[in-house]
Amino acid sequence: MPVDPTLLAFYNLMRVAETRGEYLDRPDVDILNPLVVAQEQENYDRWSGEAIAPARAAFDFYKRATKIFADAGVLIVTGSDAGIFTNIPGRSLIQELHLLSEAGLSPGEVLRAATQNAARALGEADGAGRIAPGHRADLILLDDNPLDNLDAAGRPAMVIAGGRLYDRTALDQLNGAASQPDLARTRKNLIEGLQAQGVDPSILGGQPAS
């Protein structure tokens, strides 16, 4: 069974506690959707006052557990819970790669967790997760070797996704647009997601599903 440690989630909880909330104002938090931020305010207030030692102990425990699982041959995959709490979309995955490395995984193991292992966990290893004939051409093209520096994975020169190529200019434009969320679209997506799960969307403050 695959395991997604989501170390970043526990790291961010710890950092909010350690800084008494100052971590919530770090660079790139403007990418977080304001609607989600508003819903998370109670959690922000709580973790800004949490005891630091238990938060550190929990984070250390999950790192040790991740290494134990990896050494035992468990399929490790990457995840970051991006978009909730203070887990910044896009940036969070690269942070997760570093945290997996900090837990003791080799650079190769870390990169496989984000590629081949993820495809295996989803039952898509025959068509995704690696560069091979017959596989989907969803690729990131890098200037540097991520085996030498995991940060390289967060600085793609180009991205090919869904058959479309995004050069560095296009990627910069997307990054800029990410800090200007469409609240109406977000609400629509949330309502549709809740309805798909059989949840009454009136919990968002709107009208019950018709």
Image: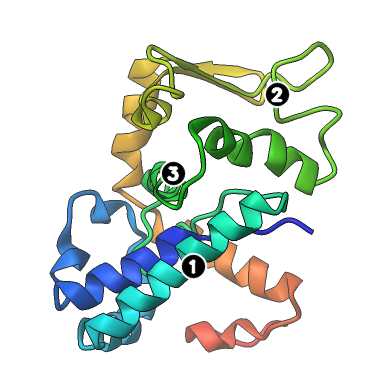
Q: Quadrant of residue 18?
A: bottom left
x, y percentage for residue 162? 66, 26
> What residue sits 74% from the left and 39% below the top?
119
Q: Which residue is mark 1?
A: 62
Query: In the image, 13: left or right of 198?
Result: left
In the rendered image of this protein, does residue 197 appear above or below residue 175? below
Residue 199 falls left or right of residue 92: right
Question: Neighbour class for label 2 at 10 Å: few (<14), some, many (≥20)?
Answer: some
Mark positioned earlier in the residue sequence (2 or 3): 3
Relative to 62, 192 lies left or right: right
Location of the N terminus by quadrant is: bottom right
The nearer-to-camera label among 2 and 3 is 3
Q: What is the basis of the colouring in this image?
A: rainbow
Tell me: 160 left or right of 50: right
Distance from label 1 to label 2 (Cα)? 28 Å
What residue is shown with label 3? Answer: 101
The residue at 36%/77% (across/down) is 57
First along the sequence among labels 1 and 3: 1
Q: Secondary structure under badge 3?
A: helix
Q: Earlier in the sequence, mark 1 or mark 2?
A: 1
Q: Are marks 1 and 2 in contact (CB under 8 Å)?
A: no
Which residue position holds label 2? Answer: 130
Question: Which element is circle 1 on?
Answer: helix
Residue in front for this viewpoint, 16 or 85: 16
Task: Answer yes or no: is residue 83 visible.
Answer: no
